[in-house]
Image (spheres, rainbow, N blue to C red):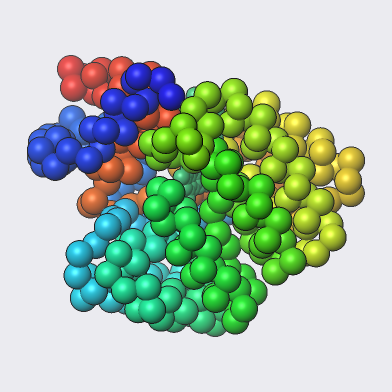
C-alpha cells in the first residue's frame, strides 16, 4: 500500500480532522466533485439527469458505525421513504447500504430485520437493495446477512472485494445462490496477511474474479456487476463477456458519481449497462477520505479548492 494511501486511510479515523473539515467551506466545495449535494433532493435530481443520459443509479446515504439502534431504525425509515419516492417519481434507482449503518455493531438479528424490511420494500417498488462491504472484520457477518436475504428475495446484491485472499472461495460459495455481486477492488486499510498489499496483484486478482463471475452468471444466473473506474480492465472484462456469450444486462458496469464521467457515457453508447453510485448526507468525512486515498492526487484538488 502506498504511504499516501495508508496516511489518508488513517486520517479517516481522526475525529478532530472530521470536525475541522466539516466546519470548513472549502471542504464542502471539494466534496462536490464526488457528490451532487448533501440532501436527498440533490441525489434525486442527479439521478433524473443521469437517467436522461441512459445511466442508471444507486443511492447511498453516508454514515457508518452507528452506536444506537434507534439511529439504525431512523436510517431504515429514511430508506423506506426513499424507495417510495423513487417509485412515485419513476426514477429507476437502487439503494446500497452499509450494515454498520443499520446496526450491525449493535445487534446482528436487528440488522437483519432492518435489511429484510428494506429488501421487501425494494421488491414492492421494483427496485433493488445492495449491501456494501466494509472492512474485513465484517465480511463473515455481511455474507451471513446476504445469504439470509437472498433466500427470501431475488433483487438483493452484495459488494465483494478483490483484494482479500478469501474472495475466490467466497464467490464460489455464493454462485449457486444466483447472487447479484458487485466486484470492487476494496477501499480499506487491510493487513498484508489477508489482502494484496500491491495494487498490481489486486488488479490481476480482479480480472480473474471477473471471469469467475461471468462463468457463474452463465451457469447459474444472477447478476455480475463490475464496480471500478479502471477503464482498461473494464474493456477486457467486456471482451471476456462477449467471448462467453454473456450479454449486457447479465452484467453491469458501476462507477462512482463524478469519476470517469466521459467513460461512463462512452460505455452507454456501446450498449453497455452503466450505473453510478450517488452518495448524499452530512456524514461524508470517512467516505471522502477513502475517495482521496484511492487517488492521492485528489488531495491537490482539495488544496486548489482551499485557495480558490
Ligand atoms: C460502484 C462502486 C461501489 C463500491 N462499493 C464499495 C464497497 O462496498 N466496499 C469497498 O471496500 N469499496 C467499494 N468501492 C470502492 C472500491 O473498492 C475502490 O476503492 C475504488 O473503486 C477505487 O478503485 P478502482 O477500482 O476505481 O481502481 P483503481 O485502479 O484504483 O483506479 C482506476 C482509475 O480510476 C481512477 N480513480 C479511482 N478512484 C478515484 C477517485 N476516488 N477519484 C478520481 N479518480 C479515481 C484512478 O486514478 C485510475 O485512473 C466501490 C466502488 C464503486 C465504483
For the point 69% across and 43% down, the residue is: 209
Q: Is residue 10 visible?
A: yes
Q: Is residue 54 visible?
A: no
Among the 4 quarters of the image, the one containing residue 25 = top left
Among the 4 quarters of the image, the one containing residue 202 = top right
Residue 128 appears at what percent x and percent y?
A: 56, 68
Question: For this rendering, which residue is in front, 221 or 272?
Answer: 221
Question: For this rendering, which residue is in front, 214 or 305?
Answer: 214
Residue 268 appears at what percent x and percent y?
A: 68, 42
For the point 55% across and 75% down, the residue is: 149
Q: Does 229 sit left or right of 47 as displayed?
A: right
Q: Does 147 sit left or right of 69 as displayed?
A: right
Residue 86 appears at what percent x and percent y?
A: 46, 69
For the point 24% across and 62% down, the residue is: 66
Q: Does 8 sit left or right of 201 as displayed?
A: left
Q: Quadrant of the N terminus?
A: top left
Question: For this rendering, which residue is in front, 260 or 7?
Answer: 7
Image vertical order of residue 137 relative to residue 259, above or below: below
Among the 4 quarters of the image, the one containing residue 80 = bottom left
Image vertical order of residue 90 relative to residue 233, above or below: below
For the point 33% across and 61% down, the residue is: 100
Number of numbered labels in the structure image: 0
Q: Which residue is most to the front? A: 193
Residue 198 appears at what percent x and percent y?
A: 52, 24
Q: Quadrant of the C terminus?
A: top left
Amino acid at each position: 500500500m502506498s504511504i499516501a494511501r495508508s496516511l489518508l486511510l488513517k486520517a479517516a479515523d481522526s475525529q478532530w480532522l472530521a470536525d475541522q473539515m466539516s466546519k470548513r467551506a472549502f471542504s464542502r466545495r471539494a466534496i462536490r466533485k464526488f457528490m451532487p449535494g448533501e440532501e436527498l433532493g440533490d441525489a434525486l435530481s442527479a439521478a433524473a439527469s443521469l437517467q436522461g443520459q441512459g445511466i442508471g443509479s444507486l443511492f447511498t446515504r453516508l454514515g457508518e458505525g452507528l452506536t444506537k439502534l434507534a439511529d439504525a431504525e431512523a436510517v431504515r425509515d429514511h430508506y423506506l421513504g426513499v424507495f417510495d419516492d423513487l417509485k412515485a417519481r419513476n426514477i429507476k434507482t437502487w439503494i446500497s447500504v452499509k450494515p454498520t449503518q443499520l446496526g450491525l455493531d449493535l445487534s446482528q438479528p436487528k440488522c437483519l430485520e432492518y435489511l429484510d424490511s428494506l429488501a421487501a420494500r425494494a421488491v414492492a417498488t421494483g427496485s433493488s437493495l445492495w449491501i456494501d462491504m466494509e472492512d474485513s472484520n465484517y465480511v463473515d457477518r455481511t455474507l451471513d446477512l446476504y445469504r439470509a436475504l437472498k433466500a427470501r428475495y431475488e433483487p438483493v446484491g452484495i459488494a465483494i472485494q478483490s483484494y482479500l485472499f478469501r474472495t475466490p472461495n467466497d464467490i464460489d460459495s455464493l454462485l449457486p445462490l444466483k447472487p447479484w455481486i458487485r466486484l470492487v477492488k476494496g477501499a480499506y486499510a487491510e493487513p498484508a496477511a489477508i489482502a494484496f498489499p500491491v495494487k498490481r496483484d489486486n488488479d490481476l486478482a480482479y480480472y480473474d474474479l471477473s471471469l469467475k463471475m461471468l462463468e457463474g452468471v452463465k451457469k447459474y444466473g444472477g447478476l455480475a456487476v463490475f464496480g471500478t473506474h479502471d477503464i482498461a480492465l473494464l474493456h477486457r472484462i467486456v471482451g471476456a463477456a462477449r467471448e462467453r456469450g454473456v450479454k449486457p444486462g447479465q452484467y453491469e458496469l458501476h462507477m462512482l458519481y463524478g469519476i470517469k464521467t466521459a467513460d461512463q457515457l462512452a460505455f452507454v453508447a456501446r450498449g453497455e449497462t452503466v450505473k453510478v453510485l450517488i452518495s448524499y448526507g452530512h456524514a461524508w468525512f470517512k467516505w471522502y477520505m477513502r475517495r482521496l486515498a484511492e487517488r492521492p492526487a485528489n488531495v491537490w484538488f482539495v488544496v486548489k479548492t482551499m485557495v480558490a
